[in-house]
Amino acid sequence: MQGVAVWVGQSWSEALGGMVLVDGPIFICLAYGYANFVNLGHASLRIRIYRELQSSRHGILISELRAKYDEVQILSNRLQRMINAGDIKFDGAVYRLNKLRLLAISHAIFMLKRVVLGRQSEFFP
Amino acid sequence: MKVFLVLVFLLGLLFILHLTWWRIARPRRGRPVLLGLFIVGGVLLAPVVGFLLSWIGIEPLSFIQWLNVGLGTVAFALAYVVTYSALEADSPTLSLIRHIASSGRAGLREAELREFMSARPFLGARIAALIEEGMVQQREERIHLADHPYTLFRLVLLHRDRVLRIKCPGG
């Protein structure tokens, strides 16, 4: 974008400022959006349910879904994923935090929830 | 610098509009309404922002610079709408990591984590959300896809299968 702006008469210094202050953040926003789009396909429960429904002509019994995706299953999937990524450690008895990365993200998300929705959890308003 | 100022001002105004609207009456289908607010609101508010900034002595933006502002608004809107999904619905992963972190060096046993998860019916909440948003329909004890296809989810699945070629089930 800054290249086009220079071509139509903007100064180089303004263009450099534009790259840092505007184009850089735009790139980061688009990259962040794409990364989350990819993550939806990996980890989203809603997508998984939607996929099951897509491949079922007569719908699915709610009890069937509950049996397939109960909280134990969700817990097990998530814990394994976090162990593989090094976010938590399991010493055979207990799970402990290993890296701060996900914790920092969760603090940011929970703070934003408070600001935007006025609550920290959909289960405990 | 002008483009940066206009973008910050415009996005700030749109965010204030968003918060005010959500405090008064949160829309049922948050994500599409939010995207519409940022894009349509951005187009409508841009001349107002341009006028206000010229009033305080900042030179008007050129067409290319306004395009840059438009691109910035759309990029931010997309990033925020994606983040909003994580605000509406609790993430099991982020909820778990906070709970594990709160235990400090003592850590948590699997039984304690199961108790934590059983107090949070994620699946039930997801099904209820899908029904409320009109993506699925409940008929007696069965749920079915709604008659109209949900484009975003179809895109995600298409991307997962054809571009990323992921075989494992996920979730």
Image: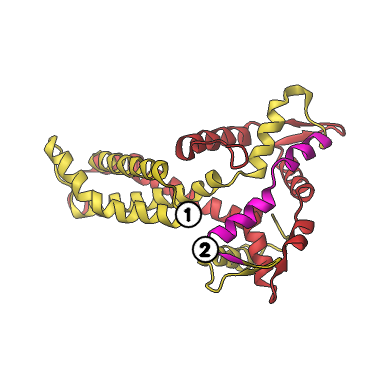
What hue does chain B carry in this figure? yellow
Task: Identify the image quadrant of residue B119.
Answer: top right
Q: What stretch of residues is rendered in magenta?
A: B111-137
Q: Is residue A56 above or below residue B34?
A: below
Q: Is residue B146 above or below residue A8?
A: below
Numbered badge on residue B28: 1
**Residue at the top extreme, as displayed:** B105
The percent position of residue A28, horizontal first and vertical second, equals: 45, 45
Q: Give the amino acid at mark 1.
A: Arg
Numbered badge on residue B152: 2
Q: Give the amino acid at mark 2.
A: Leu
Q: Residue at x 27, y 44 (%)?
A: A15
Q: Secondary structure at mark 1?
A: loop
Type of secondary structure dominating the magenta stretch:
helix
Q: Is residue A39 left or right of residue A27?
A: right
What hue does chain A carry in this figure? red
Badge 1 crowding class, 10 Å Cα cut-off, few under 14, some 14 to 19, many 20 or more, is few
In-front residue for pair A86/B21: B21
